[in-house]
Amino acid sequence: MRKIASKDLGMLPLKEKDRPIVRALLSAGCCARCILRFCCIGLQSAYRQSYEDLMNELQTFVSAGGCGKSHDVADHEHTEDPPCKRVKLDTVEGDTEVVPHAQAESDLDTAEPKVCVVCLGVLQHFCDKTFAKKVSEAVTAEGYQFDSLVLSVSLPAQLSVREHSTWLLVKKEVREKGLCLGKDDVIQVKEAFKWIMNGLVSQELCVPVLAKSLFEVSVGFTHPETDGDCHFLATTCSDCFKPAKNKQSVFTRMAVVKALEKITDENFRRQFPCPPKCPTTRCTAQDIQCLHVSVFVAGRYNKFSRTLPQTPWVIDGERRMESSVEELITAPLLSAFRSEGFNFSSSGREDVDVRTLGNGRPFAVELLNPHRSQFSKEEVRELQEAINKSSDKIRVRDLQIVTRDAVGHMKEGEEEKTKSYGALIWTQRPIEKEDIEFIKDIKELKIAQKTPLRVLHRRPLAVRQRVIHTMTARFLDAHHFHLHLRTQAGTYIKEFVHGDFGRTRPNLCDLMKTDTDILELDVESVDVDWPPAVGD
Ligand SMILES: *[C@@H]1O[C@H](CO)[C@@H](O)[C@H](O)[C@H]1NC(C)=O
Ligand SMILES: *[C@@H]1O[C@H](CO)[C@@H](O)[C@H](O)[C@H]1NC(C)=O
Ligand SMILES: [Zn+2]
């Protein structure tokens, strides 16, 4: 018996104990590759054989058991079936040739090209060179720069229901034979798909297809005909199916898997056919989706304009300022990286009327789904120059590509950092040089700031303690002087000067014993030692 089997089996490592399982699955309408999966065949090359060869081998295998001279006990129940009829085999996509071969019992009738009851055709019609070409062409058309990729597959949720139903069938078969098999040993559809397709896609695109990569190619399948398969689960586990904002259906794969873990075998069998019903259509492949992980670019910017907000200023859907720091910096980056979007962040921010001078303010831009991601130092320098030349309102230095983790440093310990400011102050009472001399003697002045009125609409009301480390004043005229401050980051300078109706205490009005206001403010330095300086 073993001899016949191994001779006929070609390369399939099937054992005698698999014969009843193969037989049951063939008659249930499983495709050849799903049968391998349920026989827990972990030999990847077995799945890569042509579908016809594989089906041939499987049918030879069952007929060897059914028609062979020696029967073992396990196959006894099937011996009444008519032996070895000649019928045609399933045909796969793009191949209309009918392959005749020896085939066994009538309940294994595969005369019609049938769509697999489990994988709904995924492992039959979408696991060949033709589909690999289709995927590769879609990827190539997107024009990404990549030197490896990861292939990910998303399957219709009902596939899990069908998998479960088929598993119950196999379990029954296995149990009757006194064998033992765990559900975890069954090879997943996704896994089998990748075993076949990774190599084929790799050949087409000439890059390795890996388990992990910065570049992800997603293939998704739907099968509307059987979408209703999942619905009965809602009554067995209402907790499992909660509407989620961005999901079209509550029957997500995760929710279905969870419900299947809870339902008893008896209850499942009562509500869902076992084996599953034969579908009349195969799955539909969705558009291929490509995604490259974000690239992060960091640098420091100067802002020389008092009419330029940091981010687009939109009130009631209408733009108030024609541009913004963010847009000026990101426009050349977006086009160079051919990115789909961005996420701009910086170490603090300045008001629209505040300039940022000195070494500039650290910033980082996350470029989302960049089609190009590799740039030489020289190319990054050219990008910086392009930003510099695009406007005289801003300049950028130390532009560089950084890691996602490094961006975290920018925000780390931001509160403890020091910032330096220059401010033009107006005083109500006329002053003389001597009136502002006391200012330089004030050190480590602790102030308490209630959330300023002007930001109350977007920040919670709180009292924040801040420290003004040092100040120096330079007399200009009877109502004006220049004030230089070194403060803890996060200090509201304007409020410290005018007092914000007493919400900042003490304030410059208290110290000067007259009303003071701030006419101009510049950030002179942001003492964050990131990103590192870039040499020429
Ligand atoms: C932008 O960055 C923030 C914080 O770093 C993050 O929470 C958010 O998800 C990002 N947005 C996108 C579209 O990646
Ligand atoms: C851009 O401007 C900054 C600030 O003036 C300067 O330090 C940097 O060298 C300039 N970079 C290029 C490439 O033009
Ligand atoms: Zn299948």
Image (cartoon, rainbow, N blue to C red):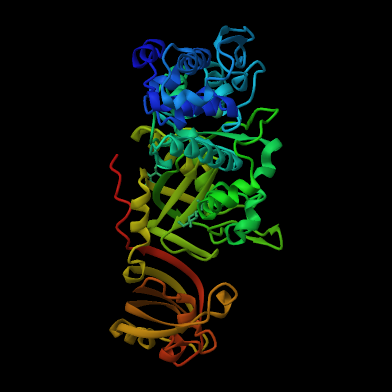
Q: Position of residue 506 (x, y in %)?
A: 42, 89
Name the quadrant of the N terminus.
Answer: top left
Ligand 3 lies in quarter: top right
Q: Position of residue 364 (x, y in %)?
A: 42, 51
Q: Position of residue 192 (x, y in %)?
A: 45, 29
Name the quadrant containing residue 321: bottom right
Query: Who is closer to the viewer here, 486 or 254?
Result: 254
Above or below: residue 221 compared with residue 3: below
Above or below: residue 35 compared with residue 311: above
Q: How many marks?
A: 0
Name the quadrant containing residue 490: bottom left
Query: Who is closer to the viewer here, 228 or 6?
Result: 6
Residue 289 shows up from this direction: yes
Q: Is residue 179 left or right of residue 386?
A: left
Q: Position of residue 465 (x, y in %)?
A: 39, 82
Residue drawn at (63%, 25%), measured in percent from left and top?
115
Query: Who is closer to the viewer here, 193 or 159?
Result: 159
Name the quadrant of the C terminus.
Answer: top left
Residue drawn at (33%, 57%), measured in percent from left and top?
409
Residue 151 shows up from this direction: no
Q: Is residue 253 left or right of residue 382?
A: right
